[in-house]
């Protein structure tokens, strides 16, 4: 039994929307009924609205990676050349998926903490004019770095390739104009800015991508999006729906629509900007200073300190669950999340905790200095909203 | 629909223990079964353990005031002289109850923000040697003031009077040695340090009080504690049990026993002490500096400012629900709670919010200064716990 108050503060699962959690108690329902179809239709139309697209948005019973797999297995033929951008753990997952399904990936790597530039993607497209797809992260969660999705989309648009975007932490944290920029396949996940538990993946599919799908020959059944599209048209999921999560999602989508997707994005952006100023006030080094994401801020552990110790102190001293670095970055960075149901009060507490942790480990920090940086951001935003 | 994340931060209802809330979903049970009796017995024995008494502790389906009424209606005869200490809204409630039931109260008043001293109680007991009862608050929630319960108990013990203690916010926030000090009737409520929703009142009854009860003649039925005592012996509630709250209470009591009641008290005391140092760091004036409670800290609004505006800013700017003054104190003070399921991270956030609110209203405050005071308290406590 945890005696300390527990706070889930990671970039996914994220803090849960209370009314969405409560709605899950209504799960004693059958999914092949008109009542459920009405709910499912509401959810699909809500997803389309918050994705901000006229494209179909499909819902899969899977973690985000299931959505990524669907984005690979539905649109290509064995041996297809695809350009895969990889600048972190999730870029590597694209590479793994492409290889697992027998594609021929051209991998554009960038060091952790950086992103693959649009120029490099443009060059690769010229060198590989037959490439059938380009894979990117909108926001690379493992490093807190944001890709220039718009610029890359502009380059892909004129080619036969489709742009496949892992937007699992990108959706709701950064502007993504799916139709305006031409993002062909966009994958989201329930446990991110959607503020509900893991278990649902979302995939939007453009007309260009559906044309790819018509010629695709990779093995798939559970994640067959063409079949899922037909079911969706009938207000159903192909396989058994995750009723509890659909109930939660319906509440979350009502909340996001009441707030406005742009405001949800602006909230993450404000919190991210404030986190960076707090890090600066505490003389901490950002891990991805050139391309910082708004979903999560990765911060380097102070010299000589293992970030695992910081993560452990958060948990043991304060009951706060924050994320370590992943893979090779474990021990080197820690990550402060601010997507979905996070607010400035969460940040006040997490930065105050961080200051106490650093001070208790002998790092020279001015107590309250990081918090004050965030308070100034709040006050400035308030002035800005009064004067505009 | 609230767009801002809502935080309940008042002195009652208090923040809820998550596992207790979850347990309420098991309410599809019948209360006249062996299963429920086993649960009810566990709860009654758990209450006795956390009250820290060998006395019977009974559980009523009522708000705290129902428990106060039971403490009046069960132990006295019409016209009995009783000494009632009143230094706030809840002291006044004792007076109201005594009058409503036809007792003859001798009212010892103290200004809001102070308490009635043991000396005054001693004098009154000398002047009224036939007084049958003395009524006090352990902690006066409306003003954040703590009575010297132990000293008063020492004076009452040698008289025919019983000491009746409203410990609704006192339990779990201050030491109360019911048996050692001789507290005859002690009233608690579910929505305070017990960390569950309102709807249950708890009453412990000493042998001396049961002797009073045997001679009592005030009208009562629903709150008849003698009848409730018999039911409790059979593992039952006299009337229909509040099944959802009993389920929640069972979880809360398991939590409190795992933590230790002394630790729960120490937590409130540490948070209260830190709140006072934060107020000092922000040049704010405490409302009850001579006898501050550990349940809630009342702070005067800065000169020329209405505390209602501060309370409103907490709600509108941050979604935080904190309490205004009650009755005559409305607009003059605001109250920061720290009983039950509160921790230092709650305090980091609430003080950071307060600093932003004051700054945005033109009060000269050093941003982060109050938070730093709390951080120092955390760091000192950590050193203390390492070195002891």
Image (spheres, coloured by chain):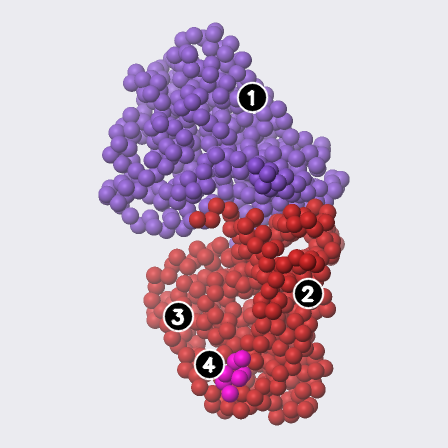
Chain colours: A red, B purple
Q: Identify residue for label 2.
A: A287
Residue corresponding to mark 3: A241
Eye-nearest disc, 1 or 3 = 1
Q: Tell me the element at label 4.
A: helix
Q: Report how many numbered discs are placed on residues in the image.
A: 4
Q: In which quadrant is the C terminus of chain A drawn?
A: bottom right
Write down the region rendered in magenta: A96-102
In the image, what residue occupies the spot 33% across and 35% down?
B44
**Is B223 drawn above or below residue A244 in the view shown?**
above
Indicate which disc residue B115 carries.
Answer: 1
Q: Is residue B308 visible?
A: no
- Classify residue A310 by image quadrant: bottom right
Judge if badges 1 and 3 mark residues of a common chain. Answer: no
- C-alpha separation, residue under disc 1 versus residue under disc 3: 61 Å
As measured in the structure, the alpha-carbon distance from the residue carrying label 4 to the one carrying label 2 is 37 Å
The prevailing secondary structure element of the residues shown in magenta is helix
* Mark 4 neighbour density, 10 Å: few (under 14) some (14–19) many (20 or more): many
Assess disc 3: are there few (<14), some (14-19) or many (≥20) residues with their C-alpha within 10 Å of its C-alpha.
some
Classify 10 Å Cα crowding around label 2: few (below 14), some (14-19), many (20 and above).
many
Percent across and percent down for residue A295 are: 62, 64
Mark 4 on the same chain as mark 3: yes
Which chain's residue wears label 3?
A
- Report the residue at 62% width, 52% height from top: A350
Q: CA distance from mark 2 to mark 3?
A: 39 Å
């Amino acid at each position: 039994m945890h005696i300390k108050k527990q706070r889930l503060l990671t970039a996914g699962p994220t803090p849960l929307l209370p009314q969405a959690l409560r709605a899950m108690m209504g799960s004693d329902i059958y999914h092949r009924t008109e009542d459920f179809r009405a709910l499912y239709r509401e959810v699909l139309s809500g997803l389309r609205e918050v994705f901000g697209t006229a494209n179909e948005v499909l819902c899969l019973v899977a973690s985000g990676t299931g959505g990524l797999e669907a984005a690979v297995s539905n649109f290509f033929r064995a041996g297809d050349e695809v350009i895969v951008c990889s600048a972190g753990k999730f870029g590597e997952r694209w590479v793994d998926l492409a290889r697992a399904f027998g594609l021929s990936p051209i991998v554009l790597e960038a060091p952790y903490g950086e992103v693959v530039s649009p120029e490099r993607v443009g060059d690769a497209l010229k060198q590989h004019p037959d490439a059938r797809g380009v894979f990117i992260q909108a926001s690379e969660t493992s490093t807190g770095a944001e890709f220039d999705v718009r610029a890359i989309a502009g380059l892909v648009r004129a080619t036969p390739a489709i742009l496949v975007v892992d937007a699992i932490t990108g959706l709701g944290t950064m502007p993504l104009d799916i139709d305006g920029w031409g993002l062909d396949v966009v994958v989201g996940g329930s446990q991110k800015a959607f503020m509900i538990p893991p278990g649902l993946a979302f995939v939007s599919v453009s007309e260009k991508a559906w044309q790819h799908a018509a010629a695709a020959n990779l093995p798939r059944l559970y994640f067959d999006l063409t079949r899922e599209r037909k079911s969706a048209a009938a207000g159903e999921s192909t396989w058994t729906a995750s009723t509890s999560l659909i109930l939660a999602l319906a509440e979350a989508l009502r909340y996001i629509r009441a707030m406005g997707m742009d405001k949800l994005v602006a909230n993450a952006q404000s919190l991210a900007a404030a986190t960076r100023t707090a890090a600066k006030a505490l003389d901490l080094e950002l891990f991805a200073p050139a391309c910082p994401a708004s979903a999560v801020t990765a911060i380097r552990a102070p010299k000589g300190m293992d970030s695992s110790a910081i993560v452990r102190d958060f948990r043991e001293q304060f009951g706060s669950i924050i994320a370590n670095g992943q893979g090779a970055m474990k021990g080197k960075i820690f990550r402060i999340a601010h997507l979905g149901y996070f607010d400035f009060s969460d940040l006040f507490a997490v930065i105050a905790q961080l200051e106490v942790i650093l001070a208790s480990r002998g790092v020279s920090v001015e107590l309250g200095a990081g918090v004050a940086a965030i308070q100034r951001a709040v006050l400035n935003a308030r002035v800005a909203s009064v004067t505009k």
